Image: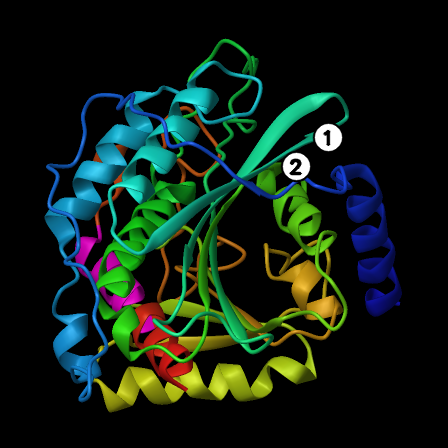
């Protein structure tokens, strides 16, 4: 029954979020940059690397200060709810940051859900010889925010800073884009960095993007990162995996945590079966048979022995000062980056 309910939920989401046929297109990059911004230290232009840098060495490039600056910028827009003016400023920021990176092609997918305009933003990183027809890697995080758990909250007017959910994942993905752009000389696969919209409307952005895919789907793996900045008790992450096709990808991420001494402990497996409990942006991809995993501090975000809960989740109080576990945030960023590098290098 859970599988049937999940399939029906996905079909409903896809129907509501279906984009126009030519929704994904290259766009000019905005020159506007909302304050505060990250100092412009773009990745070096990638060249073919006969000997790729060791992955452990690349992981050391993850820069907490840069991620914190991104987080400040993303929360400074007040709200990234699609009905709030800050949403457009957040989109402009994402496009501007991706546009600074040599070797990254910026793309966009505008669409609507129940007459609400939404937009996915992509950074495409190809190997020097161009993208193969399949085997691509998708890294995604939702950038929209909500404060629906705050009584009387007005989406078009009131703040929804969304620092942990999902400013932390969005900032991590911007850092991934910077580092992966510099490493693309060692790639054999296309890597797409996707900032998806409408997750708080039930993964609408992820479903809308999947709806544009040709068959067979060119993506071989999907990696998702969502709210990874709060846990004062432990360096715990949930490794959410979606159905049996994702088991191998799950095991690869677990192995990477040990192989590169990332230090996530405990790394807790969560099998995504219940559409009301373990649903994230990986759901549409997993149902389509694409191996998909997600990292989150705790999903669902309820207390247990290694997670105290988060009282600011989905409220106006999810502000940058509540991201109190920078070490966990860095570890989550490194773990997803390690898996991405392995997959991109083939």
- For the N terminus, the quadrant is bottom right
Residue 261, visible in the rendered structure:
no
Question: Which type of secondary structure does the marked residue at label 2 adopt?
Answer: helix
Q: Residues within 10 Å of mark 2 (few under 14, many from 20)?
A: some
Q: Would you say 107 lies left or right of 256 here?
A: right
Magenta stretch: includes residue 17: no
Question: Which type of secondary structure does the marked residue at label 1 adopt?
Answer: strand
Vertical order, 73 against 120 (above or below): above
Q: Would you say 203 lies left or right of 74 here?
A: right
Principal SS element in the magenta part?
helix
Q: Residue at x 36, y 43 (%)?
A: 164
What span is colored magenta in the figure?
325-335
Magenta stretch: includes residue 327: yes
Q: Would you say 231 lies left or right of 20 here?
A: left
Q: Foreground residue, 110 or 44?
A: 44
Q: Residues within 10 Å of mark 1 (few under 14, many from 20)?
A: some
Q: Quadrant of residue 90?
A: top left
- For the C terminus, the quadrant is bottom left
Do the CB atoms of the residues marked 2 and 1 lie less than 8 Å apart? Answer: yes
Q: Residue at x 29, y 24 (%)?
A: 31
Q: Which residue is mark 2?
A: 201
Q: Which residue is mark 1?
A: 113
Identify the disc placed on residue 237.
none
Q: Which percent across, then down, holds residue 142?
A: 49, 45
């Amino acid at each position: 029954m859970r599988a049937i309910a999940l399939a029906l939920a996905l079909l409903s989401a896809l129907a509501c979020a279906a984009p126009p046929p030519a929704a994904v297109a290259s766009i000019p990059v905005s020159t506007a940059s909302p304050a505060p911004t990250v100092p412009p230290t773009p990745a070096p232009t990638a060249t073919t690397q006969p000997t790729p840098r060791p992955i452990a060495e690349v992981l050391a490039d993850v820069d907490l200060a840069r991620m914190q600056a991104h987080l400040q910028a993303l929360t400074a827009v007040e709200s990234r709810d699609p009905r709030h003016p800050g949403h457009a400023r957040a989109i402009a920021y994402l496009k501007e940051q991706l546009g600074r990176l040599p070797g990254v092609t910026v793309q966009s997918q505008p669409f609507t859900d129940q007459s609400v305009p939404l937009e996915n933003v992509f950074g495409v990183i190809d190997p020097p010889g161009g993208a193969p027809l399949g085997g691509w890697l998708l890294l995604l995080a939702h950038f929209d925010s909500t404060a629906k758990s705050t009584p009387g909250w007005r989406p078009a007017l009131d703040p929804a800073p969304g620092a942990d959910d999902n400013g932390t994942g969005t900032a991590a993905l911007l850092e991934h884009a910077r580092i992966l752009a510099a490493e693309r000389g060692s790639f054999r696969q296309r890597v797409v960095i996707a900032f998806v919209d409408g997750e708080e409307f039930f993964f609408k952005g992820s479903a809308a993007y999947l709806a544009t895919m040709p068959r067979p789907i060119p993506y071989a793996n999907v990696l998702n990162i969502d709210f990874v900045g709060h846990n004062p008790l432990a360096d715990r992450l949930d490794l959410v995996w979606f159905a049996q096709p994702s088991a191998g990808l799950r095991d690869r991420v677990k192995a990477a945590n040990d192989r590169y001494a990332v230090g996530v402990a405990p790394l807790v497996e969560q099998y995504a079966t219940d559409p009301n409990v373990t649903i994230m942006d990986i759901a549409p991809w997993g149902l389509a048979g694409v191996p998909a995993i997600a990292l989150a501090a705790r999903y669902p975000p309820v207390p247990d022995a290694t997670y105290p809960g988060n009282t600011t989740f989905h409220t106006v109080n999810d502000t940058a000062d509540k991201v109190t576990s920078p070490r966990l945030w860095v570890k989550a960023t490194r773990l997803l980056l390690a898996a991405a590098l392995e997959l991109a290098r083939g």
